[in-house]
Image (spheres, helix red, strand yellow):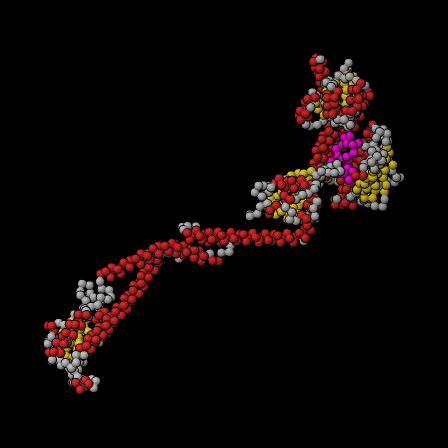
Amino acid sequence: MPTILIAEDEAHILRVLAIWLNRHGYDVLEAPNGAAALELLDHKTVDMIISDMNMPVMDGLELVKTIREERGINVPFLLLTARCDHDQLAKRMEAYHIHLYPKPFVPSRLVADIDSLLSEAKAWG
Amino acid sequence: MTAEEVPRWFGLSIVLIYLVGLGSVAQFGIVQARREGASQFQRGSRYTVKVLGERLSALNGAGTADPAVAGAYQRALHEFAANVPVRWLRVVDDERRVLASTDPSQINTIVGDDIPRDSKQAIREVMSLPVPGQKAPDVLVRVRLTLEVPTPQESVDDQPPRGGAVLHLEARLPPEPFGVSGPADQARMLAIVLVVLGALFVVYRCLREQLRSMSRIADRLQSHRDRLQEDLGSLRIGDSLDGVTTAWNDLIDLTEGLSESVQHSEADEELSRVLQCSWGGALAEALSAVPDGLIYIADEIRFEYMNSAACRLFGWNVQDAKGMILPEARASGIGAKVLDVLRGALQTDGSFEVRTDVLEADDKTGCDHSTYRVRILPLQRDHHTGECVVVIRDVSQQVRAERSREEFITHVTHELRTPLTNIRAYAETLSSGMFEDPNVITECYNVITKETRRLSRLVEDVLSVSQLEVGTIDLQIADIDLKTLLSEGVRDVRGLADDKNIDVQLVLPSKVEPIAGDRDKLAVVINNLLGNAIKYTPPDGNVVVGCRFTGQDVAISIKDNGIGIDPADHGRVFEKFQRSSDPDVQNETGSGIGLYTAREIVRHHRGEIELISEKGQGSTFLVRLPRQETRAAALSTAKEA
């Protein structure tokens, strides 16, 4: 069963994502910020990471950099953001191979996209 | 008469008059010369004949009939005629008989008396100009010699002879070559006249243009006599630029230039005087009260004036600043950067370019940098280079506000999208039919309700800020039950408090009077303050809401035991788009408009919000509102506010 790590400071969003992913057969690890997510990654292996952009303590951008550059974890990374400057952000984060996902989102569509990303990742090995 | 109308005859008439005058003078000179010549000739002739007469008289005692005497006379006459240019000489007695003559045919003949009797007539005859082609008449001169042959006795007594013969010595002289008579003289005279005429013509040609130009100048001066001061350029002559008019125009240009220079000089002196006066005068005091730094740089890039604000920025005092030269100027802090900007704006020709630079001062405290906008405004005055005015304005607040605005947009966007995300996600969870667990369904409803309220509050805040920005906030004043207002406020944040297990208590006196105000706006105030109290209070904390009536006002208190606010940030937290620099605050999401909105609403009720807080020791916000006796009074107050 694939495991997905969710880093999100908004408890309700974290909760609804967990409900939907559990319903679709994923194990979910929950973290309220980037720092907590890194702690979880110290002793857990995940198949995918979903993170909010704006979080206290450590935001999504810093989490991505740490994961890609320091931890060398190359699992699919889905960055949720409420920001408007998607194009600029995508360009900045191009080297980290992440997927930007805008808020507000539709949970069913998000789950479908997650399925696709994981299938794709699995196909590439 | 204009310059163009100067007639040609004007010059010719001058020449003619000159020639007539010259001719008259020449004629007069000639007449005088001839008169003098004739007179001299007459005198000479008379003298000559007289000398001869004396010689004849010396022929002692000879009688006229005596052939020997006649012969002596004859020899004397011939001898004398050999030395004197006469046509003939003769000796005539009273009866006009020729006793002796150089003309032998006249001897013993009776001759007529055709000699002028007086000298004037003789002179006139001499002076009569010869008719061209005719021979000039001879001149007859007679010396009436009374050659009385004395007796020997009488001759011895040296008495005049008596009874002797009275003889007349007469002579015919050829015309003397004096005066103008020959063709050579006439040709010479004509040549002289022609040369003089030619010279006069050349002089006239040379003078004609100059006279014409001078006439134009005189005409222009006459016609513009009344407005020379105002319009010196109207004296300039535009056409026919010969030497004189060109020189005249150059003179006008020079005069205009000098006049302009004098005016500039006077203006400079006035400016210098004003500046000199203003340096220590009322104007200087006024300029020193201006918060912007003002610098006037005069010619030769010299600091001529700096107001107090500029001196402070440069670390100079007023007296040291005056007269400082830009290349030699040294300053500290932001002044050094301004000097660098000035030197960068200085052109190679000594003038300044228009520039606006934004400079950040190095802040030693490590907090926010002060930001200054430096504007260099060159003065556009002729004959002056290197003059400019420098305005240094502290725009730190504007820069901070702009940054805060950007952060506000970011925060508001985030704040809006977050409840929207929740509402949408939980609504789809409900509508999908995939989740039948009653707890999940209940949770969905609760979240949707809570997030809808959160969204509404945020929209209210943003709207309030917009109304406050444009000054269109409109208070709906009514009597408000304060107990209800506070109870509903506590109820609205109960969900947030429960999430963090924060105890929210409402502590009210036994009697709570109604107050006058805008219920919805004051609800926003209570909600914002309570929301902040819960947001910045750690889990398991507590928040106490209360109120107290005093003589003049009512104080609503919201007290928490949260992270507290550093006193240094007390003023800042109420500013629009500003948040505390405390990292604990920065870690929480927020739009930065909650406290600003609350304070502005309270101020529109003629109240004030007071903050009592220390870092780490919780915070108390006191909302002081005036006790309004009537709604009408409150309305009046609100309108005034």
Give the residue at x 82% y 36%. Answer: B615
Q: Position of residue B524 (x, y in %)?
A: 78, 36
Magenta segment boundaries in residue numbering? B569-594
Quadrant of the frame with the N terminus of chain B: bottom left
Q: Is residue B587 magenta?
A: yes
Where is residue A93, by image quadrant?
Answer: top right
Q: Is residue B236 magenta?
A: no
- Front in this rendered view, residue B51 or A19: B51
Residue B528 appearing in the image: yes
| Residue A62 in the figure: left or right of residue B187 | right
| Residue B297 in the figure: left or right of residue B5 | right
The residue lying furthest to the right in this view is B510
- Front in this rendered view, residue B131 or B487: B131
- Front in this rendered view, residue B500 or B193: B193
Is A125 placed above or below B538 here?
A: above
Where is residue B310, by image quadrant?
Answer: top right
| Residue B327 in the figure: left or right of residue A82 | left
Is B119 placed above or below B452 here?
A: below
Is B458 placed above or below A94 here?
A: below
Instruction: Characterize the magenta stretch by its predominant secondary structure.
Output: loop
Q: Position of residue B563 (x, y in %)?
A: 83, 33
Give the residue at x 86% y 32%. Answer: B542
Q: Position of residue A4 (x, y in %)?
A: 76, 18
Residue B464 appearing in the image: no
Where is residue B62, by image quadrant?
Answer: bottom left
